[in-house]
């Protein structure tokens, strides 16, 4: 039975907003830890199905992260050291299952922090987050809103970092002046389209036609590519297409004889793309996610712990599986661990306070909590982001570029295109 | 007396059920109850011999409609749920004009196409459908108290009681329809269509009626889901979900009223609880698929045939009784 005082008051919504933390302590038993007891971290992402490529590699990365941290003595809190243990729940990228998973992780497993991919699944979890005060992270900052103060986006500011790739391209290949773009018509594709449009406009690159939005159920990309190439563009932008789309699109571009520049948010499993096309064809392909054996990641500015060793271990265990998210969830854990140790506690509210106290140690360097303009709340960690190009069949970091610098110069363009695509936080349904 | 006892015991078991489950199992129970209504309404549709691939989209119509009635018009949630169901039924009547020009396989494909058109409309029109992100922040069912029990509909137990009551009432209506002359005519439309037509039965009208009733209850299931989860989006009602509904119906069997319900319960418990608890989370699609193939191979008449075997054995006269007769 639910005590009456939990639901009485002016209205349920007001109650939830103003007393989420209080409700958490009353309605949801807070599990206290004994010294040495494992701290459980929830991993709530798609592990099966079409979007599993942005969940499963992250869980594999977290397993390596936990082994390394535990081998080094675990996490040091005020009451002593604790090992870390991950508890996963496959939400199949479904909001209802995500809600069930969040309930299980919080109320049964007693996790202290939950990492999510976000996107379609976040609205199902949002009421649980508001009710329990649990700290959540998402890879997609478009989930952020002022309504949920306990959701942070500390790893990637998708899709805003895509501006760095376009800016680098414009400065290093100034002859390229025309572009076309395609994307799947979904919650990942559309904000990315708006971002690339802003970036191309800021770089003075002309869009030859409106972005081509295809249905996520598309399997035959020949007509898509034919249409993309119809106006003879110098640049073809693949937006934030899933790897299931990037691969066949590149195959089609190769088969239909495209010889211009390709830019994309991701190029997961690019070695397979090279096998399907050719090394020459993929030469110069620009994207945003480096291999972690890149020497540029050994700089002192990088906060990710031993990136080269992590990459080697990951590839030894999961050969050919390295992708965009393989390191991201682990990098969030680096931040969470630092904040928990600073707070001396793993409790969500204490970690949140410590995490947002000053600048954040993002994987690619110190970064600022940002996002009020676009997301209504400064819960996204923004700093530098790498621009990556394929050279001789291998991903190479060309440069780290500042996202805030770009935004300070061209933020109005980004807001304009985000509004046009209904992607501002206050335009969501 | 025996029936009354079964009813009382069944009711007590259903009321006590959530207290024997973990929190996440209670959540699964809520969705299971909603899916029972979905698959049972689907069976009513199949009584006339037509199998649709658009039933889950119709469920989505109820979900979207109910969400929009509350969000845009401020209609009280229970009323908007009923209106959502009515909207789904009315849309089914509209769709019946083109769709019932087809039969069998062509109807199947036609219903898929109609469903995809509806999904594309949801995606394309950000106003009012929210585009690809759908609608979030849908009003929950307002909490209330009945004196001895405080209904807090964020809690799965409260919502289970609410949804369970609605679903049992709906199942009773669906059962009465099937057993009524209208239901018998549905069977005739399927198995003896020429004879029925010769007897003056308007085949198309009865097919439309079955489609509309089934869609209305599917829409109600969608509305129940929308106001619990708090969000709807086009991907939640895609063909993949429809395949699950078909699987429940096929594995359970559609010859009896309880067949699809049995299929839905067994497969949901297997997929969402047993395999997850066994630590086979990521292997679930593989194992689920294998079990489905095996059940179709070895239980071609569905799980309901097992129940029928058991009940037949129990009701069969003993040898000495046989000899006496």
Image: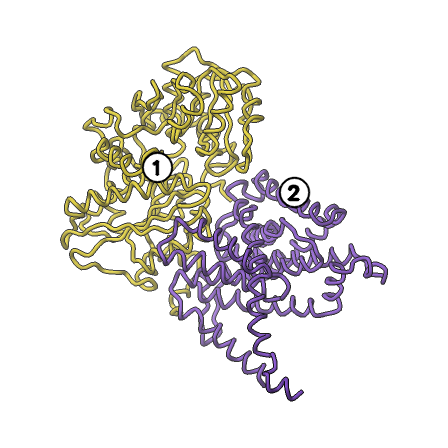
Chain colours: A yellow, B purple
Q: Secondary structure at mark 2?
A: helix
Q: Which residue is mark 2?
A: B113
Indicate whether A39 appears above or below A404. Answer: below
Q: Chain of mark 2?
A: B
Q: Nearer the viewer, residue A27 or A323?
A: A323
Q: Position of residue A211 (x, y in %)?
A: 53, 26
Asked if badges 2 and 1 are on one and the same chain, I answer no
Indicate whether B201 appears above or below A412. Answer: below
Q: Position of residue A202 (x, y in %)?
A: 43, 20
Instruction: Name the residue located 57 percent from the left edge and 78 percent from the top edge.
Output: B314
Instruction: Say if residue A167 shows up in the picture.
Output: yes
Instruction: Name the residue located 44 percent from the left edge and 52 percent from the top edge.
Output: B287
Instruction: Say if residue A11 shows up in the picture.
Output: no
Q: Secondary structure at mark 1?
A: loop
- Other residues around mark 2 within 10 Å, as few (<14) / some (14–19) / many (≥20): some
Which disc is residue A57 wearing? none
- Marks 2/1: CA–CA distance: 35 Å
Q: Which of the 4 image quadrants contains residue A210?
A: top right
Q: Position of residue A282 (x, y in %)?
A: 41, 20
Q: How many marks?
A: 2
- Other residues around mark 1 within 10 Å, as few (<14) / some (14–19) / many (≥20): many
Q: Position of residue A113 (x, y in %)?
A: 30, 50
Outermost residue toward the top in this view: A175
Tags 2 and 1 touching, CB below 8 Å: no
Q: Nearer the viewer, residue B300 or B83?
A: B300
Q: Which residue is mark 1?
A: A325
Q: Nearer the viewer, residue A90 or B129?
A: A90
């Amino acid at each position: 039975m639910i005590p009456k005082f939990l639901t009485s008051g002016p209205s349920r919504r007001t109650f939830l907003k103003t007393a989420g933390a209080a409700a958490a302590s009353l309605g949801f038993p807070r599990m206290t830890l004994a010294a040495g007891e494992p701290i459980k971290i929830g991993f709530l992402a798609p592990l099966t199905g079409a979007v599993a490529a942005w969940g499963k590699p992250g869980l594999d990365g977290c397993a390596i992260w936990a082994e390394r941290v535990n081998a080094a003595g675990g996490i040091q809190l005020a009451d002593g050291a604790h090992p870390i243990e991950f508890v996963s729940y496959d939400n199949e990228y479904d909001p209802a299952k995500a809600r069930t998973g969040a309930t299980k992780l919080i109320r049964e497993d007693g996790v202290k922090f939950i990492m999510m991919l976000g996107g379609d699944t976040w609205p199902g979890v949002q009421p649980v987050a508001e009710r329990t005060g649990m700290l959540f992270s998402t890879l997609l900052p478009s989930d952020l809103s002022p309504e949920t103060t306990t959701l942070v986006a500390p790893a990637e500011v998708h899709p805003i970092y895509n501006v760095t790739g376009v800016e680098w391209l414009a400065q290093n290949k100034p002859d390229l002046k025309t572009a076309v773009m395609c994307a799947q018509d979904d919650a990942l594709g559309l904000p990315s389209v708006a971002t690339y449009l802003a970036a191309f406009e800021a770089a003075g690159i002309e869009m030859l036609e409106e972005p081509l939005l295809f249905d996520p159920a598309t399997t035959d990309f020949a007509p898509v590519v034919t249409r993309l190439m119809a106006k003879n563009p110098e640049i073809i932008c693949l937006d934030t297409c899933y790897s299931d789309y990037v691969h066949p699109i590149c195959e089609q571009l190769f088969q239909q004889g495209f010889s211009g520049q390709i830019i994309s948010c991701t190029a997961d499993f690019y070695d397979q793309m090279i096998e399907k096309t050719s090394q020459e064809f993929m030469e110069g392909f620009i994207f945003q996610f480096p291999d972690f054996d890149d020497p540029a990641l050994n700089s002192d500015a990088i906060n990710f712990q031993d990136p080269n060793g992590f990459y080697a271990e990951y590839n030894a265990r999961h050969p050919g599986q390295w992708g965009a998210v393989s390191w991201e969830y682990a990098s969030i854990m680096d931040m969470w661990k630092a904040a928990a140790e600073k707070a001396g506690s793993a409790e969500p509210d204490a970690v949140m306070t410590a995490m947002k106290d000053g600048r954040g140690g993002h994987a690619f360097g110190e970064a600022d909590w940002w996002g009020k303009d676009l997301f209504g709340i400064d819960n996204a960690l923004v700093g530098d982001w790498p621009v990556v190009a394929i050279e001789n069949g291998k991903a190479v970091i060309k440069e780290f570029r500042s996202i805030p610098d770009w935004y300070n110069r061209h933020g109005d363009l980004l807001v304009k295109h985000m509004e046009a695509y209904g992607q501002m936080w206050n335009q969501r349904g | 007396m025996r029936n009354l006892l079964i009813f009382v015991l069944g009711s007590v078991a259903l009321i006590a059920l959530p207290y024997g489950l973990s929190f996440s199992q209670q959540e699964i129970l809520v969705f299971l109850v909603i899916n029972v209504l979905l698959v049972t309404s689907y069976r009513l549709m199949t009584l006339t011999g037509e199998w649709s691939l658009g039933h889950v989209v119709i469920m989505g119509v109820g979900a979207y409609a109910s969400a929009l009635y509350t969000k845009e018009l401020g209609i009280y949630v229970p009323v908007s749920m009923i209106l959502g169901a009515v909207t789904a039924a009315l849309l089914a009547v509209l769709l019946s004009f083109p769709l019932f020009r087809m039969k069998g396989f062509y109807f199947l494909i036609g219903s898929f196409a109609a469903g995809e058109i509806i999904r594309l409309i949801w995606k394309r029109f950000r106003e009012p459908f929210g585009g690809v992100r759908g609608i979030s922040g849908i009003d929950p069912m307002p909490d209330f108290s009945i004196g001895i029990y405080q209904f807090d509909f964020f809690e799965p137990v409260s919502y289970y009681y609410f949804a369970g009551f609605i679903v049992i009432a709906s199942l009773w209506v669906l059962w009465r329809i099937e057993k009524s002359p209208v239901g018998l005519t549905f069977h005739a439309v399927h198995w003896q269509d020429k004879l029925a037509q010769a007897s003056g039965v308007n085949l198309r009208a009865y097919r439309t009626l079955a489609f509309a009733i089934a869609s209305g209850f599917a829409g109600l299931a969608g509305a129940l889901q929308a106001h619990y989860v708090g969000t709807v989006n086009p991907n939640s009602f895609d063909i993949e979900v429809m395949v699950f509904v078909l699987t429940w119906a096929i594995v359970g069997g559609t010859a009896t009223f309880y067949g699809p319900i049995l299929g839905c319960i067994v497969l949901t418990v297997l997929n969402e609880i047993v395999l997850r608890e066994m630590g086979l989370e990521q292997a679930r699609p593989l194992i689920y698929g294998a079990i489905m193939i095996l059940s179709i191979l070895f239980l071609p008449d569905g799980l309901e045939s097992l129940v029928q075997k058991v009940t037949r054995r129990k009701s069969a006269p003993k040898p000495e009784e046989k000899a006496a007769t």
